[in-house]
Image (tube, coloured by chain):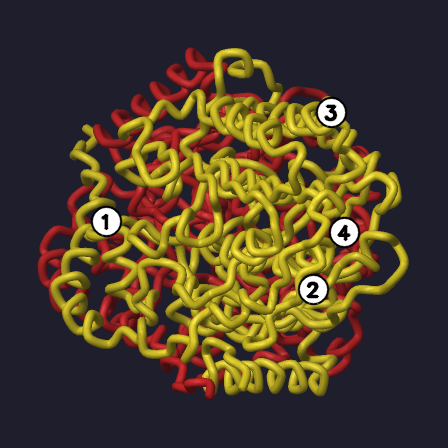
Chain colours: A red, B yellow
Amino acid sequence: MAERRKAPRRRILKPSLLIVGLLLVGTVAWRACRHSGGKDLHPEGAVAQLERVTPSANPAGLPNIVIILADDLGYGDLFGYGDRLLETPNLDRMAAEGVRLTRFYAGAPVCTPSRAALLTGRYPIRTHMTLPLYPTGHPMGLFLNAIGRYPYGVTGIPEDELLLPELLLRRGYRTGLVGKWHLGDRPGHLPNANGFEFFYGTLYSNDVTPFALYRNGRVEVPAPADQDLLTQNYTREAVGFIRDHGQEPFFLFLAHTMVHEPLHASEAFRGRSAAGLYGDAAEELDWSVGRIMATLEDLGLEDKTLLLFTSDNGPWWQGSASPFRGRKNNITEGGFRVPLFARWPGVLPAGLVSNELAISFDLFVTCLEAAGVPVPDDRIIDGKNLMPVLQGKGPSPHDTFYYYFGHELVAVLHRNWKYHRRYMSDNGGYPLFKHGPFLFDLERDPQESYSLIESEPERAQRMARMLDEQDAAVAANVRGWLP
Amino acid sequence: MAERRKAPRRRILKPSLLIVGLLLVGTVAWRACRHSGGKDLHPEGAVAQLERVTPSANPAGLPNIVIILADDLGYGDLFGYGDRLLETPNLDRMAAEGVRLTRFYAGAPVCTPSRAALLTGRYPIRTHMTLPLYPTGHPMGLFLNAIGRYPYGVTGIPEDELLLPELLLRRGYRTGLVGKWHLGDRPGHLPNANGFEFFYGTLYSNDVTPFALYRNGRVEVPAPADQDLLTQNYTREAVGFIRDHGQEPFFLFLAHTMVHEPLHASEAFRGRSAAGLYGDAAEELDWSVGRIMATLEDLGLEDKTLLLFTSDNGPWWQGSASPFRGRKNNITEGGFRVPLFARWPGVLPAGLVSNELAISFDLFVTCLEAAGVPVPDDRIIDGKNLMPVLQGKGPSPHDTFYYYFGHELVAVLHRNWKYHRRYMSDNGGYPLFKHGPFLFDLERDPQESYSLIESEPERAQRMARMLDEQDAAVAANVRGWLP
């Protein structure tokens, strides 16, 4: 006679809650008094730099700038090998009419720091924007703080940072943000306080409660906002902004919420894609790109507009990072590598595919250069002008990229070599334990499978030193103020 | 004048240690009295089943069986797309002379349960071998126990389990284990107590201290054993075992320690591969396969020997899981999919590549069938005979596979559809939070990128029910005893 018994109940949540509980009780208070926020402000703030910008005498001669940023859209979703399940005819057309970069890096593998990098031209650690922001009291924010992931303790982008819209506004641009902000929710940290004359969108990721829709300083759709219509609403507002300002130079930052989880698509797109709801949402994004292009065409602004499309980091739960290892939140290439399309008929060639190294903070400098705005000189700007690369006329302005995960410097890229200092985080995650360092030749081994550290010990040592030097330089001057 | 301050010290270790410390203090004692180990033993043990095995009247007519098991070798290391950095001429030859399965699953995405599945023909949960074992008092074992990952609390494979070598021994085979055991370190749980007449090897993974080399019950090389020579030593002992028993039927389980981290290779292989030390170690494994094949050839045993090669799970820190998502420790395909080569000249065709679904516990049944041993009938055996598949004569005996992670049932495969119940674990790991379910069509989307759950709600519900039913069946009879 067989003996029978009940299997143990699944208890995954209990020890997990225990971890959270014990950590919160034990360390929140301790951490709270260790934050450095506010202690390393710019002595003079941003005003002097803004005064360096000359308002254009001939605004009509300035190019418009539109940056469309997808959320969590993967490299492989657009650039993947083999059969693609997604259909993106508008992005395909944008690539055919412009330039595609295959070695383009997000500034960080998560939302907030990646956006900070793009808008400030700096590594996120310099702006204190090292991890996603949460509303005050949100459990995830408390948890991340408790385990020491917010050493700077700020809740929004510091007021002494110079954002792309602030500089362009001073130059004479009309500036608008449609979509996701995610750089702060308090006075002084809101979009309208940071150079955007117009704001329609959301303050957080769409998995964070409360999720409301704002128009400038006011809630237009109280939480919970209907996310099915988000891409439609953003697109309507973006098109409206372009139409309103077609006769002036404008800077539009269209920061879509999709395809960040939870996924949503409007009725017209739901169930349409072969790639499920993710595909529906991504195809609606593509439609949105098409609407922007059609609006520019309608207004005869195509040749006068630098149009950029990218993603803030690798794909999260769904989407494809192919051919790379890892995804969003990972320090492998799958977290950082994103698609980049640039179109500016008459200025950029059509159909160019470039393998030159470029980084999202380069877009800050590239846009300033296009607009004739001097790059700030009172602070370290990590970005470089990409125009020569985009025109196919010059090599990458970078040979090095530093991978930060939160405030930790974890890896460095030098030409085709990538050195991981300590661990990689995509296999069940034992960040408690050291499993490294690793050295990969991304040219031969883009998936970071085979470390060459034993056969290239001197190269590894040099790259370890690069990390130490970067750490020391940042430690001496976190915010990167220049004398 | 720029303000300067020190960057915060990296404190990653402190909160981590805090987690471990608080958890240990708080829960070890609580857990210790909740273990079910020993409460669900087979009422009669394994003796009656062993007595069902008839010792062969013509042992010379029995085929030899050699299973070579690599540790943490990835699917993509051998089956990857594009340029392969590894050179494995011997495995290439083995595949050319035999059969290659492209849809072969390990029974689990980590060492101990995967080995238990292979040797018992059963899902690891039935044998209580759900997670890697550690020596008594090892911090990792204590930690995993503290967070509830050892609900059965056993420290070795239960004595009432029937292992492949026990059954083959009774049939008249000489049985040997060379290499890694990892199914227990106490009396009753050691290889020689589980059907292996001969044992040369190690009791744990090679990242666990103390790491000694045993010959049968005795330490031959005290810890720390020189791991550079491990593959050489294993191969020498394996070749010796074959030579000693060439005139009798033999079962050899050559369970290599490589390419589990820390990686090692002998001087002759170190620095030889284009894929770094991982490649060196993998190429030495390939050499070892070549030595086994050459020994069989020398002794004229090729046609009399079923030779099998596989890996226990996906690749860990290094190695390639291409084209799949995730790696060892993950519940995505990259954790479970492994290469399988089978060679038996005259019985299996040469050069066959089969896409039929097969699972490592099938090897248990397949080997028993080849040896004329009846499959145990007092317990659920999940494995099936693969001979028709290996001969290219029949379809897979399975249409379903259940993915366990530890003792948790997390996903199910049904034909080409995979349903994840709750989350996937390869992107920075938020197992505290639910991010699912997900439904993937592995035929069109082998990388598990695009969930079709919204467009296939009924299929998803059916598969969710399959999981509930499997959970209920296992809860009613964890060990799977049959009346």
Residue in view at x 31 percent, y 73 percent: B38
Q: Nearer the viewer, mark 4 or mark 3?
A: 3
Where residue B300 appears, x then y in whole percent?
A: 77, 28
Residue B346: image quadrant is top right
Query: Vertically, is A195 above or below A420?
Result: below
**Residue drawn at 69 percent across, 68 percent down:** B440
Report the amino acid beneath label 1. Answer: His
Circle 3 chain: B
Residue at the image position 46 percent from the left and 18 percent from the top: A454
Q: Which SS class for mark 1?
A: loop
- Residue sitting at 55 percent across and 31 percent down? B241
Badge nearest the viewer, 2 or 1 = 1
Residue A146 image offset from top left, x and y in percent: 21, 60
Q: Do tag 4 and tag 3 residues touch (Cβ < 8 Å)?
A: no
Say which residue label 1 marks.
B138
Counting from the top left corner in percent of width and height, residue B26 is at 14, 68
**Rounded to the nearest whole Å, what is the CA distance between mark 4 and mark 1?**
67 Å
Disc number for residue A252? none
Q: Nearer the viewer, residue B288 or B301?
A: B301
Sequence order check: which comes first, mark 1 or mark 3?
3
Q: Which residue is mark 2?
A: A282
- Kindly indicate whether the residue at mark 3 contacts the one at mark 2 (C-beta within 8 angstroms): no
Q: Which residue is mark 3?
A: B89
**Amino acid at dot 2:** Ala
